[in-house]
Image (cartoon, rainbow, N blue to C red):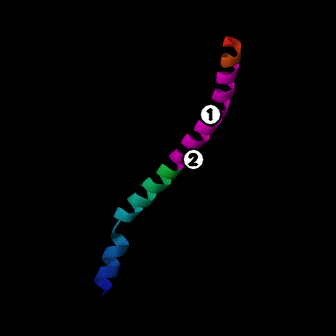
Amino acid sequence: MSYSFRNLWSDEEGQDIAEYSVMLAVILVVVVGTVRLIGSNAGSVFSQVGSSLQ
């Protein structure tokens, strides 16, 4: 029984998964924030271009 706990404690594979999930979460937050910022600005630019063409 103590061997399985020791093996589980020294296993570092789970730490890699946790690090990748945190990195993925940070990347998703940055992408969503950028898309929201660009999306609102792009909408106003397209409206201005559309109204100037008419």
SS of the residue under disc 1: helix
Q: Residue at x 70, y 13 (%)?
A: 52
Rendered location of residue 6, percent (x, y): 33, 78
Q: Residue at x 66, y 18 (%)?
A: 50
Q: Choose between 14 and 28: the one closer to the eye.
A: 28
With 6 as the anchor, is 46 left or right in this view?
right
> Is residue 49 shown above or below 35?
above
> Is residue 17 shown above or below 35?
below
Where residue 49 sits, quadrant-wise, is top right
Badge 2, how many Cα within 10 Å: few under 14, some, many 20+? few
Q: Choose between 17 and 45: the one closer to the eye.
A: 45
Residue extent of the magenta highlight: 26-48
Q: Amino acid at mark 2?
A: Val
SS of the residue under disc 2: helix
The dot on residue 39 is 1
Nearer the viewer's eye, disc 1 or disc 2? Answer: 1
Rendered location of residue 35, percent (x, y): 58, 37
Where residue 13 sits, quadrant-wise, is bottom left
Rendered location of residue 38, percent (x, y): 62, 32
The dot on residue 29 is 2
> Is residue 44 shown above or below 52?
below
Q: Residue at x 39, y 58 (%)?
A: 16
With 14 as the anchor, is 45 left or right in this view?
right
Residue 43 belongs to magenta span: yes
**Quick one: quadrant of the C terminus?**
top right
